[in-house]
Image (cartoon, rainbow, N blue to C red):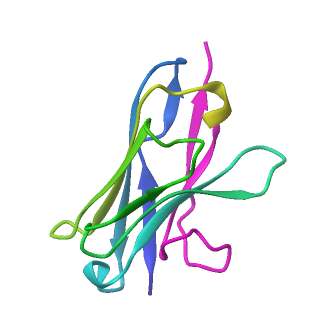
Amino acid sequence: QVQLVESGGGLAQPGGSLRLSCAASGFTFSNYAMSWARQAPGKGLEWVSGIYSNGGATYYAESVKGRFTISRDNAKNTLYLHMNSLKPEDTALYYCTKDLYGSPSASRGQGTQVTVSS
């Protein structure tokens, strides 16, 4: 059974940083591309970033390019999202998803809330 458990969210000030983690189990993590997606209040699911199974290629939405970094540790079955220069518009529930582009039909966790506010 696929399990994805996100953590690391919280309250950050504009310009601040957070690191999200996603612990994966129930499947061979190293065989799958993974991604982060987010959903702001009253809005649809938005893809944020994706990474190939071996970490060899990464992709970012224009809205986060240059500020966020996705990475993974296949030995620890963990996906990360390092978020810098946070903006109020980054406020959302962030999900770890078991595919490259955050498809709504892909397996994902319960999410971790990120709130950016002064």
Position of 112 with respect to 46 (left or right) is: left
Name, please, the residue furthest toward the right.
42
Q: Which residues are magenta?
A: 91-118
Occupied quadrant, residue 66: top left
Name, please, the residue furthest toward the left.
75
Position of 110 with respect to 40 (left or right) is: left
- Residue at the (44%, 82%) spot, across then down: 2
Q: Is residue 5 above or below residue 34?
A: above
- Residue at the (56%, 37%) spot, across then down: 114
In terms of depth relative to the viewer, which is nearer, 110 or 63?
A: 63
The image position of residue 35, as x and y in percent, is: 47, 64
The image position of residue 27, as x and y in percent, is: 35, 86
Position of 72 with respect to 35 (left or right) is: left
In terms of depth relative to the viewer, which is nearer, 80 or 112?
A: 80
- Residue at the (56%, 52%) spot, across then down: 61
Q: Is residue 114 above or below residue 39?
A: above
The image position of residue 89, as x and y in percent, is: 67, 32
The image position of residue 94, as x and y in percent, is: 56, 51
In terms of depth relative to the viewer, which is nearer, 58 or 36?
A: 58
Query: Is residue 96 shown in magenta?
Result: yes
**Considering the image in quadrants, where does the N terminus appear?**
bottom left
Name, please, the residue furthest toward the top.
118
Q: Is residue 25 above or below residue 92?
A: below
